[in-house]
Amino acid sequence: MFGATENAILASVLQEGTTIINNAAREPEIIDLQNFLNKMGAKVKGAGTSNIEIQGVKNLKDVSYNIMPDRIETGTFLCLAAINRTNLLIKNADANHITPVINKLEEMGCSLKVDKTEIEINAPKKLKAIDIKTMPYPGFPTDMQQIFITLLTTVKGTSIVVENIFENRYRFTQELVRMGAKITIEGKTAVVKGVKKLYGANVKAEDLRGGASLVLAGSVAKGTTKIENIEYILRGYENFIDKLKKIGLDIELIKG
């Protein structure tokens, strides 16, 4: 879990002596954190590998730093285009960080054009059912599992998704079922049978990615979808509503 690795790094940079983290997460966010801290004067090395060494320093300095693109946000918008069977150009994206996501979209039949800082997707009307297994980085990211399940509910055929990272990450499927999806949960496995149409409903976000998946479902559902607990979604996607409006979604944030 890369959050635990990040916390361990942050707890060690100002501690006296040397700290070694074994079996560290290897996500690109870890490398970005190392680069940021080292620019501040920290002494961290090994990010991106399973062993990270931190030599404590007494002080850190102020710096200006541009963080890496959000790979899960990129993947979410790619799947948004796919579920709507349309094309979309995403700027300030790093395809190297989401290779498994791109591979799965191509396996489904999407055409993706990758540039240094841009990804363009063109999704055909008919997509193929696929199987997915979440794995630690650089495998298929668990944070994209819920997004892909939602996409797969609209694809003809049966898809199998296996969640190998977190428990209880299928709770959101109950909300999708209320919208007409056909999903069966068997332990770590979700069996998704595509349906012709999803239908608008009053649903509730249980977590960040599950909430985002409901937005994707609502974007293609017949009728109006109302999502509660949107604070889960907004904490993980910057200016999410404005970005969705910009690409043509009929969506409104209801305050209060």
Image (tube, grey):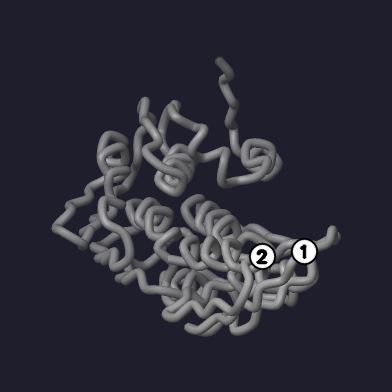
Secondary structure under tag 1 reads loop
The location of residue 6, given as percent across then percent down, is 55, 64
Image height of 121 relative to 46, above or below:
above
Residue farthest left in this picture: 186
Decide if residue 56 is on the left or right side of residue 9: right
Residue identified by numbered label 1: 59
Judged left or right of residue 226, residue 248 is right
User: Where does the image place residue 255, in percent across and percent down from the top left?
Assistant: 58, 18
Residue picked out by circle 2: 14
Q: Is mark 2 on a helix, strand or loop?
A: loop
Instruction: State if disc 2 and disc 1 touch (CB < 8 Å).
Output: yes
Give amino acid for label 2. Answer: Leu
Residue 22 location in percent, x, y?
44, 81
Residue 200's image quarter? Answer: top left
Q: Quadrant of residue 224?
A: top left
Number of marks = 2
Residue 75 in view (yes/no) = yes
In the rendered image, the vertical position of residue 33 relative to residue 147, given as above or below: below
Question: 230 or 74, which is in the foreground?
Answer: 230
Frontmost residue, 249 versus 47: 47
Name the amino acid, label 1. Answer: Asn
